[in-house]
Image (spheres, grey):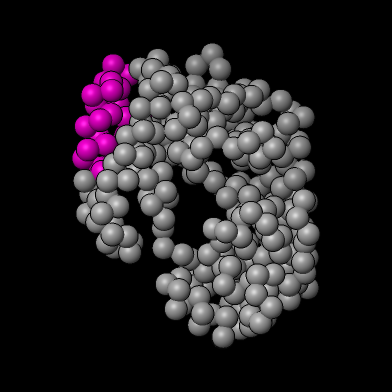
Amino acid sequence: MPDEVVVEVQEHPSYRLPEYVSPSQLSTFTKCPLQYWFASVAGWREPPSLAMITGTLVHDVLEKLMALPPQARTPDTAWELLRTLGAKTVDDLPKYGLAPAQAKDLKEKSAESLKGYFEIEDPREVPIDAGGLEQDIRTEISGVRFNGRIDRITEGEVRRVTDYKTGKRPDAAYLPDTLRQVMLYAAALASIEKPVDEVELLYLNNAERVRRPAYTAAIERATSDLVENRSRMEGAFSNLAWLATPGGICRTCAFRSVCPTQHSDTPTPGSSECNSTLQRQGLSQRLRQAS
């Protein structure tokens, strides 16, 4: 475990904790609370990466594919959807600050993910209806407000939450963090009296499935983790002091140039000098409105 460093941040009337906790926010916080502060409290956004755009494209293709009647969910239909939706995504690349030349990588990576999907399962055999696709859920879990977007809920003899992953399957040490996400979806569905029997992750690029029973003990562990980390978020926010966890994640962190653990002479996070640096790097800031 890398050393943790306490970083003081500057107070601002528009900096506030999100009202709801999402799985992605929770994952960021557990890896580096200071990175969470920059992204979710101070509201800094970096332009979407090619990997993020590719992931969105593949999710859109699978959503539209699974919304079709079972007999229509063929590979030919999926490739046609990818061509149609991919053409629009390619046209939008300059809007995200990406070069047209990156279209080749987008096409190759999205095709690889779709090919991997069909190696995992035959979508014609998946019992599902349109209401179980890309379902937004907003509820309260053990006193913590939670929201998320579930890729797929499979019906039938086994009711199952499925999450598509277009990145590579993580090492065994990091898999529990990803499984926690779908276990929290299971907890959220149980809170609205729509429990599931299993959760699964489909790693499309690896053509691998990770499936686990939605045991009560597993859901309780994920819930306890959510409650504990929400308490830590609130404590850090009140104290204006956030832990930073320098390590491997720093290589791809959008806030590396203004992180005190990386540069001893950086201005205080949240200061006008810090914000000006992030703006020059092309990041944008979206401040939360008071509720």
Answer with left or right where residue 255 lies relative to residue 187. Answer: left
Q: Position of residue 219 (x, y in %)?
A: 71, 34
Q: Position of residue 273 (x, y in %)?
A: 56, 85
Stretch of the chain drawn in magenta? 63-86
Classify the position of the C terminus by image quarter.
Answer: bottom right
Answer with left or right where residue 111 lies relative to residue 198. Answer: left
Q: Nearer the viewer, residue 172 or 220?
A: 172
* Residue name at image x 77 percent, y 61 percent: 4
Residue 264's image quarter? bottom right
**17, above or below 215, in the image:** below
Residue 18's image quarter? bottom right
Q: Nearer the viewer, residue 27 or 197?
A: 27
* Residue name at image x 78 percent, y 59 percent: 3
* Residue name at image x 25 percent, y 34 percent: 81
Q: Can see residue 180?
A: no
Residue 91 highlighted magenta (yes or no): no
* Residue name at image x 55 percent, y 22 percent: 159
Answer with left or right where residue 206 lies relative to residue 141. Answer: left
**264, above or below 25, in the image:** below
Our reading of the magenta stretch's main secondary structure is: helix
